[in-house]
Amino acid sequence: MNITRLKNRIFILIFMAILIFPWIAGGTVRIFNKDAYEKLSVVETEKRKMAQIEWSNLLNTGESISNFVDDRIPFRYTFIAWYNKLNGAIEAKYQLIETAIGSKLYKPVEEPAVTEEVADVGPEEVVEEPVEEVSPYEQFFPLNVNNDVIIGRDGWLFLYGENEFECYQGTNILSEEEKQAYVNKLNELKSICDAQGKELYVIIPPNKSSVYYKYMPTVDIVSSWRRIQQLYEYVNTNCAVPFIYPLGEELVATGRYQIYYKYDSHWNHLGALFGVNTLYDKMGVPYEDPSVYITGPQPAERYDLFEYMGVPESDITYDDFEMTVDYKPEITVEGLNIHSMINRTTSNGAIDKKLCLLGDSYREGMMPYLAKDFTKASFIHRDYMSEAKADIKNADVIVIEAVERFDYEAFSCAQRVINILTE
């Protein structure tokens, strides 16, 4: 028999066994021990609503069928956990070797020496210069990616996908034409807002890797003058719209507090308050230093990047903390729900204006503060703008927010606001 044909048949049989085994084993366990099946099923471990088939959209895409089947593969989460443990054990050994080799080859970039001409004044006493120790954050640390998550120094986790790594390396620089197109969009929206008596602001929260870069692995940086820095300079030079990128403020804050979650990609409550203050600075709204509202530490509540990697809840490291922020307790807010895609609030705050914040998940951290300061506020995820046109039209202040890795969404959002305000 042909050896190649035999190998192909063996591989096919193994592949078919891998596909069929979970269903046979799962069905058997479910018949004889339903409690054990439910304990190991995806329903118990992922704690979310399972995907359903979108019958009305089947002619356009079959993705809902794929998701429906994926969610119902018996022991799916258990198999993912086994794979991650095996992969982690192999990766740990590989990383030891990679670190040892990298440490030998990697040389930090040194500043060029400045040569000065000194007059010859005779022999001098030779003083030995102290040897400067290299910071552990400047030493070689290999890139290790697990399911789109970077495992950084000291156990910090960062997003690898969603454009974050490209932002960090500086490989996604905008052209002059693209930057000008963005400026044109903002200028058009500003002229419409001015005519309707509305204020307009754009805020771009920094990526976690931009703020806590010291925990990032050793990788090639293509451009240290990154995309958002170039865009920030260009917009503020050629456009009258306040365009806020609070990297400097967040970096200063890291010297006092932890302002992003260790195991999640978002800023925490305190980091969001520092961001809100940069917005208030452009608005001319007085604000206090965030330390005024700190009442003490509390366990962090965000561990999403562990879930990205498929880490079981029992294996998650719960050692992250953040500061408890009790912001203006004398003010009462009605209707606040940070997880709602469209949320409307009222308060007895000091700013008697209607605020409309259009943004992504980073807006959630900003909502408790803005809701207390504005008497009326609408917080809308940008994917739901078509359902909140009245909020946009009736707003006195429009704030567009998009995290750094999704900066282009801010300008797409601006176009949709133009469309709504000119209907």
Image (cartoon, rainbow, N blue to C red):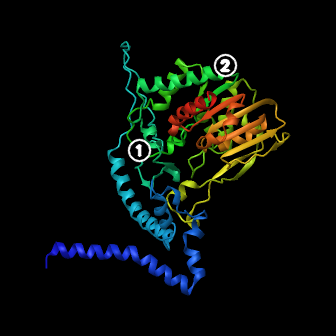
Q: Residue 41: where, in percent of width, then height?
A: 55, 72
User: Is 101 on the left or on the right of 423, as rendered?
Assistant: left
Q: Is residue 376 above or below residue 52?
A: above
x 34%, y 75%: residue: 16
- Disc 1 marks which amino acid? Thr
x 44%, y 29%: residue: 225
Q: Is residue 217 above or below residue 8?
A: above
Q: Residue 25: where, in percent of width, then height?
A: 46, 81
Front one among 57 and 171: 57
Circle 1 — which element?
loop
Front one among 84 and 354: 354
Do callouts 2 and 1 mark residues in contact (Cβ within 8 Å)?
no
- Disc 2 marks which amino acid? Ala
What residue does disc 2 label? 195
Q: Residues within 10 Å of mark 2 (few under 14, many from 20)?
A: few
- Quarter-wise, where is residue 134 in the image? top left
Q: Residue 148: where, in percent of width, then height?
A: 45, 52
User: Is 365 on the left or on the right of 183, as rendered?
Assistant: right
x 42%, y 35%: residue: 170
What residue does disc 1 label? 218
- The C terminus sits in image quarter: top right
Whether residue 71 is visible: yes
- The N terminus sits in image quarter: bottom left
N-terminal label among 2 and 1: 2
Circle 2 — which element?
helix
